[in-house]
Image (cartoon, rainbow, N blue to C red):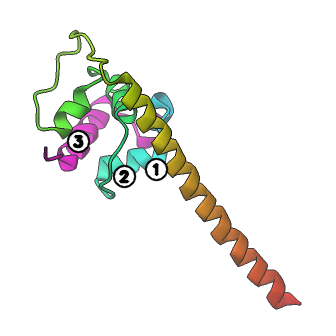
Amino acid sequence: MTEDWAAVAKAISMRVNELGWRQRELAERSHVSQAIVRELQHHTVERRRSARTLEALSSTLGWHPQHLLAVLQNRTPPHPDEPVDDGHELWSRLDALEQRMVDISDRLEDVQSSLATVVKHVQSKR
């Protein structure tokens, strides 16, 4: 199945504009990091995202929880009143944990890089 991340980016951008929100507001309301919202909205990094992330953004934007997943998969998004197909709840939760691990790993790499810079700076002053 092909994924259309550009369509997801367009859908998010259009809806955010309709609501008059900024990325930060969407991030805060959906409890999704602003970096991930930025990557999705501007289609800068194309990588697998957890279903939970897409569900959180969809719900926050006033859509059916599976709206963005349907857009990603080139399907017609469900109507907001349709029941949620939660047959993949366990996989969604695992995806969310995996995404959190990736985020933590990225943050640790940033801290490690910053720490290395500080150590070099301190050593050069000696």
Q: Which mark is residue 8?
A: 3
**In this view of the protein, which residue sits in the foreground, 64 or 105?**
105
Residue 33, above or below 58: below
**Residue type at numbered disc 1:** Ala
Callout 1 secondary element: helix
- Residue under the image location 82 percent in, 86 percent down: 123
Decide: few, some or many residues near mark 1? Use Cα within 10 Å; few <14, some 14-19, many ≥20: few
**Residue type at numbered disc 3:** Val
Say if mark 3 contacts mark 1, CB within 8 Å: no
The answer to which of marks 3 and 1 sits earlier in the sequence is 3
State the count of labels: 3
Is 24 colored magenta in this rendering?
yes
Left or right: 59 in relation to 78 = right
Tag 2 residue: 39
- Residue under the image location 30 percent in, 52 percent down: 42
- The quadrant of the rendering that contains the C terminus is bottom right
Say if mark 2 contacts mark 1, CB within 8 Å: yes
The answer to which of marks 2 and 3 sits earlier in the sequence is 3
Range of residues picked out in magenta: 1-25
Q: Which mark is residue 35?
A: 1
Mark 3 vs mark 1, CA separation in Å = 16 Å
Residue 29, above or below 110: above
Residue 101 at what x, y percent from top left? 53, 47
Callout 2 secondary element: helix
Decide: few, some or many residues near mark 3? Use Cα within 10 Å; few <14, some 14-19, many ≥20: many
Callout 3 secondary element: helix
**In this view of the protein, which residue sits in the foreground, 4 or 102?**
102
- Residue under the image location 47 percent in, 28 percent down: 29
- Residue under the image location 16 percent in, 26 percent down: 77
Residue 15 at what x, y percent from top left? 26, 33
Residue 33 in view in this figure: no
Left or right: 34 in relation to 2 = right
